[in-house]
Amino acid sequence: MITIRLLGGAKKAVGGQASLELERSNASVLEILQFLERMAVEPKLLRRENLIVAINGADSSALSGKDPVAKSGDVVTIVTVVHGGSVQKSKREIVVKGVAPVSSGLDPGQVIDEMREKHKSLSIQVTAADAVFGFEHAHRIAQMALEAESRKIMLAKKIETDLLLRLAYTNQISEAIARVGLKKGKSACIVALSGGHGTRGFEDWLGKEFEVDDSVLKQTVKKRTELSKMLGIGANCRNEYLLDCLVERAAILVN
């Protein structure tokens, strides 16, 4: 017997069932997906390009063979990912900026609250720069949050909180703040999403109030070591591979 766990849209596709049992001694990933498609009430949610399939926690695409096989006793997890690709059509702008160490005398929470109060038309999130593996990392997570908002599958009520959770790879707010929250005297990554009124004024204000320094967002060996450790992968991996892993981990987060 093979256990099939369904998360996100994959769960909705089969009528809300979180787990199914397949009475087979073995079955390929393709056969499992075909089994689900036959019983699906919303087949469009099982488009294969939008799914990640893991066998006993390992991404099936990384396993040997073009169509990996699950055996009796295995757990196959299927989740619909949020890619962040469809927001290219969105009219909302994304601003990602690095800021040199904020004064150690300022409380990070107060700084963020004041920033949001002055720019109420924007959705703003501020995290530690060390948690961001380059500009593309932050930008892709922001795109992902926008798509989750448009599809009504956010991890939280506010998009800035969804963005924070995806950068921290957790659905627990307290854990996310502990992992990637801005600390006193540390460099910051600021992400702002427009609400339809543009972001030019915010960028101008940011340059006057803070020392904008995008170099703090760069991919560094130190960041690669810490982030790869958090993901449980080898620290000697290529930067491109780590970036893809970070984005994929954020994509499969569900409530």
Image (tube, grey):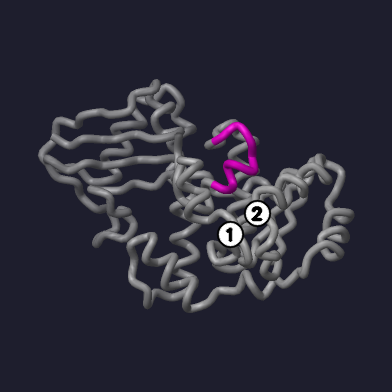
What number of labels is visible? 2
Disc on res. 232? none
Dot 2 or dot 1: first in sequence order is 2
Splitting the image into 4 quarters, where does residue 236 fall?
bottom left
Quadrant position of the C terminus in the picture: top left
Q: Residue 26, how many percent across, how many down?
A: 14, 42
The residue at which mark 2 appears reads as: 108
Horizontal relation, residue 61 to residue 132: left or right: left
Q: Can the viewer see residue 91 in this picture?
A: no
Q: Secondary structure at mark 1?
A: loop
Q: Residue 185, how many percent across, how many down?
A: 63, 66
> Which class describes the residues within 10 Å of circle 2: few (<14), some (14-19), or many (20+)?
many
Splitting the image into 4 quarters, where does residue 253 fall?
top left
Q: How would you classify the magenta stretch by its main secondary structure? A: helix
Residue appearing at x 21%, y 35% in the figure: 3
Residue appearing at x 52%, y 49% in the figure: 177
Q: Secondary structure at mark 2?
A: helix
Disc on res. 183? 1
Q: Check whether the beta carbons of the residues at disc 2 and disc 1 lie within 8 A of each other.
A: yes
Q: Which residues are magenta?
A: 156-164
Question: From the viewer's perspective, is residue 177 above or below residue 231?
Answer: above
Magenta run includes residue 107? no
Residue appearing at x 19%, y 31% in the figure: 22
Q: Residue 31, how many percent across, how many down?
A: 26, 40
Q: Can the viewer see residue 130 in this picture?
A: yes
Distance of label 2 from label 1 (alpha carbons): 6 Å
Residue type at the position of mark 1: Lys
Q: Residue 165, how many percent across, how many down?
A: 52, 46
Question: From the viewer's perspective, is residue 203 above or below residue 169?
Answer: below
Quadrant position of the N terminus in the picture: top left
Residue type at the position of mark 2: Pro
